[in-house]
Image: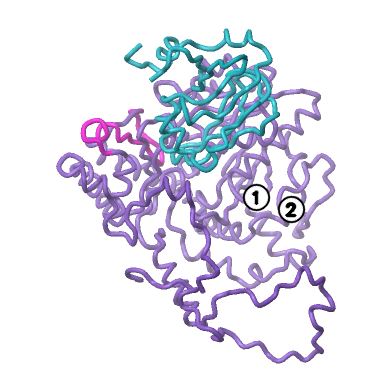
Amino acid sequence: MAQGDFPLLVERSAPGRIGAAVPQSDVPEVPLEQILPSAQLRGGPPPLPEVSEPDLVRHYTQLSQRNYAVDIGFYPLGSCTMKYNPKINEDAARLPGFARLHPYAPDALAQGALRLLSELETALAEISGMDGMTFQPAAGAHGELTALLMIRTYFADRGEARTRVIVPDSAHGTNPASARMCGYDVVQVRSDARGNIDADVLRQVADERAAALMLTNPNTLGLFEERITEVEEIMHGCGAQIYLDGANFNAVLGITRPGDQGFDVMHMNLHKTFSTPHGGGGPGAGPVAVKSHLLPYLPVPVVVREGERFRLDYDRPQSIGKIRSFYGNFGVLVRAYTYIRTFGPLLRQIAEAAVLNANYLLALLRPAFDLPYDRHCMHEFVLAGTRQQREHGVTTRDMAKRLLDYGYHAPTIYFPLIVEEAMMIEPTETESRETIEAFARGLLAIAEECRTNPDVVRSAPHTTVVSRLDEVTAARRPDLHWPIADY
Amino acid sequence: MYPEHLHYTREHEWARIENGRVRVGITQFAAERLSDVVFIELPAPGSTVKQLQPFGVIESVKAVSDLYAPVSGTVAEVNPVLAERPELINKDPYGDGWMLVVELSNPAELQELMSADEYRRLIGDGEA
């Protein structure tokens, strides 16, 4: 592990040092001035750091050692499902037939890859209760936009001018953002006292102006929508579509199917529920699955099976078109397929263990924290640090920072927005009882520190490479570059 | 904290009438709730704003919010200092932290705004 500070590449730079030797050119050299306008030529070489290969490798390896990862420790980041990703997924994705396949290879030379896509579609359709899907969206929010574009085209084809999308106040912020991107007005519906979308309020806004309801189930409070059947009747009663934000699909795998609950369209976060590495911006995969009435609108191409052969079908006149290059993040799809095949009929145990782990951890923690919606949770739960803030002047942010000193990644904080001082914890199914208990001991110890030594929490973290950052100055006066004159 | 001579919106902006023009900013309540403001995006002088429609964006370390125009009209002035010193919004929300001066197009709209008393009730302020 890299302790303390280490030099930047520019600080390691020595004039003339090189990391790789380029062989002598065996074609005649042409002066740049002959082929480029002089205004576009620089006066001298760019001031890049000059380092050897080992210097370069050590620099980036040291940087990487400052990362926290699920392969290093427990990562209870609510809503993100940071479960352990089995290494067999990596073996499959690195098979040369998948890893080295060119995206423009003709169908005849890509039968294995196309078959994988077709079988993954069949498996996910069975798991979700939907009829077909696209793999193009690169993440969940991209899937939201794709689904809303399909809904918009569906209503346009029917000659219906619907202008609104309804979202609950517990929704991921991406839901209203996607709806606005798609040109819809957003109508927000509040949650009821049990943390469900308020069906009575929903009834008042569900009319012929509503194109869709975007619902997360289990929702961001980690609670199953108890009135889902009523919600389905209200929305279909006014002719609107129901969209499932499948971010929390991990909790219900093999137990209940969104298609059976009445959802018309949904996205799945393969990088979460189906176990592929994510965080730090990707890569993800957010396939969108639809019921049969939306199948014609799927992006092109789709994979078609003809006997034992597979081909890509571009001839789909009602399609919304392409929403990403090629066929999505194919390597992620291979990993998700491997994960599903590894578990097979045991997929249900994933959801059972995720829910059991979350309820166990909740039971360990609840004596020390407030619980705004007091119900059995699904795969995650939302505590409130209001007691610590009121009685000891210690915020949820402080406690999250202090967790770093105990060697854990912090949970999601200040989300969902409807819970003050929110702390959203998702243990996932891959953690052992011992890990969950050790984490609970850590967080309970911090709650105790809030009482006995609040300053140590307020000034945390103390053991990390850098301590509490000045976020205000960093945002107001960001220093984003290395001054070139300095080297 | 909520001067009597100002008019207030439900979205926490204030409006001050100055010779037929209206000066606009956000309330102390909004500034405190946002915490440290780090960035603000305002319309260009000459553009038009519409009552209770977004005219800009304000960003703090905690949140990003739309800014809503208390009245409709043409933007006559924009506070030139805020881009460099957004912290003025926290320090002096009713003074140096002002955002726009709007040439009012429909004076009747002022009736739609709240008094200081009504605004204090909205935010549940004890001093009301």
| Depth order, front residue of A74/A388 | A388
Disc 1 residue type?
Glu
Residue picked out by circle 2: A303
Q: Marks 1 and 2, Cα distance to the nearest angstrom?
A: 9 Å
Give the mark, 1 or 2, whose residue is nearer the N terminus. Answer: 1
Residue picked out by circle 1: A121
Residue that protrudes farthest toward the front in the picture: B19
Q: Which chain is purple?
A: A
Determine whether, in the image, residue B97 is placed left or right of residue A40.
Answer: left
Q: Position of residue A303 (x, y in %)?
A: 74, 53
Q: Is residue A386 magenta?
A: yes
Q: Is residue A407 magenta?
A: no
Chain of the residue under label 1 = A
Q: Is residue A377 above or below residue A250?
A: above
Helix, strand or loop at label 2? It is: strand
Q: Is residue A240 above or below residue A424?
A: above
Residue A319 badge: none
Q: Which residues are magenta?
A: A373-394
Determine whether, in the image, residue A223 is placed left or right of residue A238.
Answer: left
Q: Quadrant of residue B62?
A: top left
Q: Position of residue B23 (x, y in %)?
A: 56, 22
- Tell me the colour chain B is drawn in: cyan
Tell me the quarter of the image containing the C terminus of chain B: top left
Q: Position of residue A103 (x, y in %)?
A: 73, 64
Chain of the residue under label 2 = A
Determine whether, in the image, residue B118 is placed left or right of residue A375.
Answer: right
Q: Are marks 1 and 2 in contact (CB under 8 Å)?
A: yes
